[in-house]
Structures are given as structure tokens and as C-alpha cells.
Amino acid sequence: MKLKKQYDCNLVMMNDLIGGKWKLRILWHIMNGDNRFSMLEKTIDSITPKVLMSQLNEMEESGTSCNDTNGNYSYSG
């Protein structure tokens, strides 16, 4: 999701950042220690690897999460 330059409402901005079916669940798992792709894939029921990677990439682009050189994801809010 591409963020706008300016928002009139903070709730609309938050929805753009973490809205959708998976992002809030992914973020919850990252904040509770499931910080590797394989851990996220195992602990989040019914998410496909393709969707997980896509959501993580979107979160990384928006600055919601970041990925270090060892493949660990973290919350960067």
C-alpha cells in the first residue's frame, strides 16, 4: 500500500499502514517474538508464503516493520 503525503485523519493513515486481513496479525506475532519468516509462517494459520512475503514487504516499505541482515523482522513503529 502506498501512503499518501498527507492525511486528514490519523485513523485513515493507520488503516493504510496496518489494515487488511493479515498485517495486524503479523505485527502482533512480530511484537511477541515470532520474528523469523519461518516462525511467522508456522504460527499464522492459513497464510500462504506468497501472501506473508507480500505483506512483510509492504510493511517494510511503509516503515511499520524492518528486516535485519539475519532475516529477523522487528516492529519499527
Image: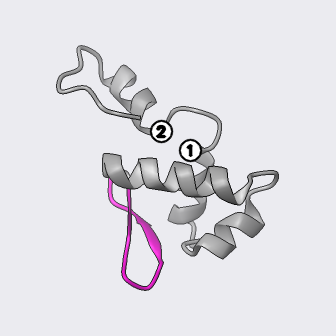
- Residue 51 relative to residue 1: left or right: right
- Residue 12 relative to residue 35: left or right: left
- Horizontal and vertical percent for residue 53? 57, 58
Q: Residue at x 71, y 65 (%)?
A: 41
Mark 1 and mark 2: Cα distance apart in space: 6 Å
- Horizontal and vertical percent for residue 77? 32, 53
Q: Residue at x 67, y 73 (%)?
A: 39
Proximity of marks 1 and 2: CB atoms separated by less than 8 Å:
yes
Kind of residue at disc 2: Ile
- Residue 68 relative to residue 30: left or right: left
Q: Mark 2 — residue?
A: 18
Q: Mark 1 — residue?
A: 24
Kind of residue at disc 1: Leu
- Horizontal and vertical percent for residue 43? 75, 65
Location of residue 6 by image quarter: top left
Q: Residues within 10 Å of mark 2 (few under 14, many from 20)?
A: many
Please tell me whether residue 34 is drawn above or below residue 8 in the rendered image: below
The residue tagged with tag 1: helix, strand or loop? Answer: helix
- Horizontal and vertical percent for residue 28? 57, 55
Please tell me whether residue 35 is drawn above or below residue 49 in the rendered image: below
Q: Residue at x 65, y 55 (%)?
A: 50
The span picked out in magenta is 65-77
The residue tagged with tag 2: helix, strand or loop? Answer: helix
